[in-house]
Amino acid sequence: MSTPSKSPVSDFILHHYRHFNSAALIDAAKGYEAHLKKGGKMFVTLAGAMSTAELGLSLAEMIRQDKIHGICCTGANLEEDVFNLVAHDFYERVPHYRDLTPADEQKLLDRHMNRVTDTCIPEMEAMRRIESVVLKEWVAADQAGQRFFPHEFMYKILKSGALKDSYQIDIKNSWLYAAMEKNLPIFVPGWEDATLGNMYAGHCITKDVKNVHTVRTGIEYMMELAEWYTNITKDSSLGFFQIGGGIAGDFPICVVPMLHQDLQREHVPLWGYFCQISDSTTSYGSYSGAVPNEKITWGKLGADTPKFIVESDATIVAPLIFAYLLGW
């Protein structure tokens, strides 16, 4: 009898994923692994609704094992990981979401269930519960004349234990909790369009928060990213692993040409690895559908930078790549 494999998922994909997008998945995973083995670091971007898709089940362990060194995510991904942490049991799955009528959607709204594809987030148990806790931090910072980034406020509420009695999943499956424990650098451009960003605007309008600048901005995030990128690339090549498209990927990748072209700094290293998982197929005029080579002309990647693109569903591809890297 053969000895059971210690990494069944990895063995499966290595044996079966040989061509087309499946082969691209393997190539990207091996490239990521090679980049780390050479002493490189990796920057991961999260678009879409990856937190509601519970990517934390694999992403959190990637963070704990130092296979991720910085993250850029949308405000939605930042908050939805915590929503899931405190309200998981109240979520509802709607597998027949393609068949919902407008009247069905209205019924979900009437029950305060906000739908993300096949998953409904409960407003009262998730969003309002987090709002009541983070509002205290916003007001405290405002009254003390202090300013923090959106992710720093989330770190504060997790560190404080204010939500501990409400946890409904194992904290090991929360990627933000893992990031908080590591004090991982996080950058959240466009936070204003997230649920908590909308709530913050409302509290500024009602003057619960007197100074709108209590939460720091996207421009300041870019300034922080510029400093962090400059420091980390003094000793290590930094790779770029992009999940989805949009601002989560567009914003941080621009830091390299900004440092080089706008600040006129010499010897700014390009990103040392690039992979994008996207269901946006190659097209004309679409940034998310642009092939990696286009980024050479913008001073983001080099001609010799290892480049990969997997045109598939990130909820399928990302956990498989992470499983390979974790030896699962």
Image (tube, helix red, strand yellow):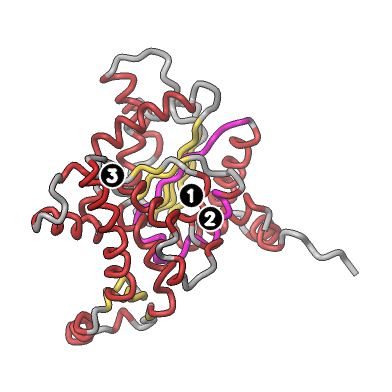
Q: Which residue is mark 2?
A: 60
Q: From the viewer's perspective, tell me whether residue 304 is left or right of residue 138.
A: right
**Relative to 33, is 193 above or below?**
below
The quadrant of the picture occupied by the N terminus is bottom right
Residue 251 screen position, x and y as percent: 30, 39
Measured in 3D between alpha carbons, the distance from the residue under mark 3 to the one under mark 2, in whole angstroms, is 21 Å
Front in this rendered view, residue 21 or 154? 154
Measured in 3D between alpha carbons, the distance from the residue under mark 1 to the one under mark 3, in whole angstroms, is 17 Å
**Residue 12 shows in this picture:** yes
Q: Which residues are the magenta region?
A: 39-63
Magenta-colored stretch includes residue 43: yes
Q: From the viewer's perspective, tell me whether residue 45 is left or right of residue 130.
A: right
* Within-10-Å neighbours for mark 2: few <14, some 14–19, many 20+: many
**Relative to 232, is 4 above or below?**
below
Q: Which residue is mark 1?
A: 179
The kind of residue on which mark 3 rests is Pro
